[in-house]
Amino acid sequence: MFVCKHCAGHFEAEAVIDANGNEFCCNGCKNVYAYLKSQGFGEFYSRLKKGEQNLAKPSSKHFDKQSAGSMFSKLLRRDENSPFICELEVLISGIHCPACIWLNEKALSNLEGVLELNISATTSKARVLFDERKTALEEILNLIIAIGYDPKPFNAIKSAKNSLSREHYARLIVALACSMNIMWVAIAVYSGYFEGLSAGAKKILHFAEFVLASPPVFYTASVFYRSALSSLKLRQINMDVNVSLGILSVYFYSVYAMLSGSEQVYFDSACMLVTFIFAGKFLQTKATQKAAQELENISSLFVEQVMSVKNNSRIPSISEFKPCDVSEVKSGDFVLLRSGERAMIDGVVLSGEASVDNSSINGESVPVGISKDDALLSGALCAEGSVIYKATSSFQGSFLNKLSKLLSNASFARAQIEELANKISSHFGWAILGLCVASFVFWSVANISAWSGASAFGVAISVLVIACPCALSLATPIATLVAMGTSTKRLVIFKDAKVLETLAKCDIVAFDKTGTLSKANLKVSSEQRFLPFDDEALLALASASTHPISKAVASYILKNALSPFRQDALENIQNIAGKGITATYKGVKIAGGSAAFIESMAFIESKAFVKSLGASLADEGGSSEYYFMYDNKLVARFFLGDELREGAKASIKELKKMGLKVLMLSGDKQIVASKVASELGIDESHGELNPEQKALLIKELQKSANVVMVGDGINDILALKSANVGIAMGSGASVSVGVSDVVLLRDELGDLVFALRLAKKTFKVIKENLFISLVYNALSIPLAMAGFIIPLFAAISMSFSSLLVVLNSLRLKGQL
């Protein structure tokens, strides 16, 4: 029997030997070993501490340009501004431990042209950002193969998970079935001690226990043995070494006792050890997978084809639309969206009417109507009707794809506290093995039975089994996975696990005003009418402008309009951007806009009148104003203010209760900013700030505290990037997904309070998990060494500690 130097697998065939005398099971392992050594990656073998199985045999695949393109081209995303910059998501089959991740990251990062690389320990998915002018797709894939792993399209991960689940179910069912039956036999054996049972009958019952215990020991528990062997061949100790030694020791001791005619066997204990430990591991795996799946549910919204027509000079007819791969649609192309179909590309409606359901992207359950000139966001489901719209981005630049990328990348980064826990658990196995040997020696020398009646052998087995580094390893990742899954259901999207830890430690929350605390649209708060005029003239004029102030005035007048107005009643329309608009209405000259614009008009009488009104501006608290002039006379003035978001005041109050300092940053005049801040209960506000000044103020605040910046993601990109945590409201999500750490898709400030509470609760749960794990081991190991715990209870206790950590983490689901 030989052991392969690379994969640590056992083989009986003739070994492949290299120049240094190392033995390998095949040329593939030999070549991979030689490659790793030649590239300076030999450290990989010393990092293999906690692998769950032997290394996979190297793949014999080799990709050329054509085969790589046919299999992976649809998974490539290109940067719209830099078409040579590509992003690839690929499943790396064979990754099973941190050492595997380290090796792949080390090898791929050293490849020229690779700009960024992340690998998820949860899904084995790699995200590679590379410049195809310097390295080709097939080079990346072949390098992964060269170091002993197998690259696959990421959509293969679902079938891999299902296969894993079926295998785990089968192993668990075998263990449970045998355990239930062996307990009936064990009861008969134990009853015989009191009621009398012949030696022959006992032997038969012991043999029955042997038969029932063997399938769980050799089939169900084989996953532990593979992991243990891999660890031992690399001179490392992991938890599965302890578990395997405990199970096999109890089983083979019982075989010896049965064959030697002893009345005391422990087949039932061996069977129950396997059942409880595997059941605990199974539940952990399912909980982790379920939590991770919450982050990938957005992928279920994707469709591969849409009805499209390439960009041309006219709107195409419906018959011209043909099925097209979604990745081939470019900005400017025409797309047909029909009833029952989901929009994959952002765009603007050109013709048709439809009712769309946006619940999958912003939680709004009531369908909304869209028609000509309305924006259509990717992810919207057409409930009724059909529209032709013009794409404003490619699929790669669409909101849905950006959101998917944000979610899929969420499990890549690890929190700092998780790194600390991993360092502690990496040394755990050796310590437990040492304590096990010490316990065996002590009780053997003492030559007495332990308090529980167990021998030195039984005490040593209990120490091996009861120690649980799993709980320590699970403390952080399971809590963060559950938290991010919970937040996704609330449509609060975290960029990665690190954000939860950082957000939990923040002390200051800084808000942008417009689009965040207030709605992006203004509303008329009051009006002054100096002379009578035709409301239809003002409505037509204000509706002819796209300026937010004009639109607010139009909405205000429209509410009180007695009949529909006619836009064609206006003639000679002149729109002066940012100032005002003039036109002729039924032969009468009309104008609307700012005070400066009206003063610039050649009407001496009106100019004097406007100046006389100037003194009262401060009385309105710095509100924006709109002046309307009809037939050379100033006839009305409208005051406009910010329309505050529903729940803004309550959210600010909640943040203060949490002990957070709240301030507001705005580009508006200080008097306007102060007024809004006062209404909301914000003590500190800063007005007249441009984007650069906002970012500088954030950096100044960071000298003494951790800062959260909340903005709409449009004018606040610099500030969002500068803050410890940048949070974007859903209204600016299409722009902000790439720069923000958290996105609130529902556009509700209540979700900000939820995010902060969830982050703090998650960090608290992580610390509780670490406390549970450390206290459990600190109490249980000495009790086992003292002989107070039998092996069966040790197995139950070990599984219970891991499940306790999982159950404690699942409490975060109640934060919805």
Image (tube, grey):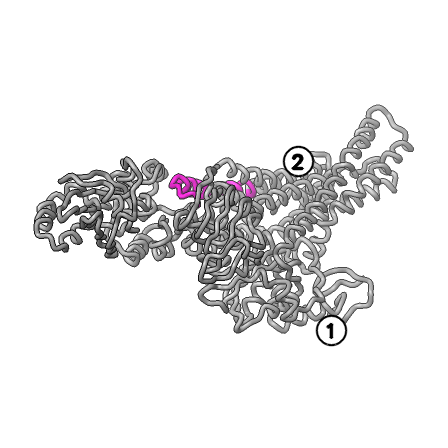
- What is the spatial separation of the Cα atoms under label 2 and label 1, in whole angstroms? 52 Å
Q: Amino acid at mark 2?
A: Phe
The image quadrant where one finds the N terminus is bottom right
The percent coordinates of residue 397 (x first, y second) are: 47, 58
State how many labels appear. Answer: 2
The circle drawn on residue 788 is 2
Q: Looking at the image, can residue 543 be seen?
A: yes
Q: Give the prevailing secondary structure in the magenta stretch.
A: helix
The part of the image, by quadrant, that contains residue 703 is bottom left
Q: Nearer the viewer, residue 169 or 368?
A: 368
Question: Is 762 part of what is drawn in magenta?
Answer: yes
Determine whether the residue tagged by mark 2 lies in a helix, strand or loop.
loop
Query: Residue 58: percent from the left, percent from the top?
Result: 70, 64
Mark 1 residue type:
Asp
- Asked whether residue 483 appears in the rendered view, the answer is no
Determine crowd level at label 2: few under 14, some 14-19, many 20+ residues with C-alpha closer than 10 A: some
Q: Identify residue for label 1.
A: 18
**In the image, residue 459 lies at what x, y percent?**
70, 41
Q: Nearer the viewer, residue 453 or 126?
A: 126
Give the image quarter of residue 522.
top left
Q: Which residues are magenta?
A: 745-774
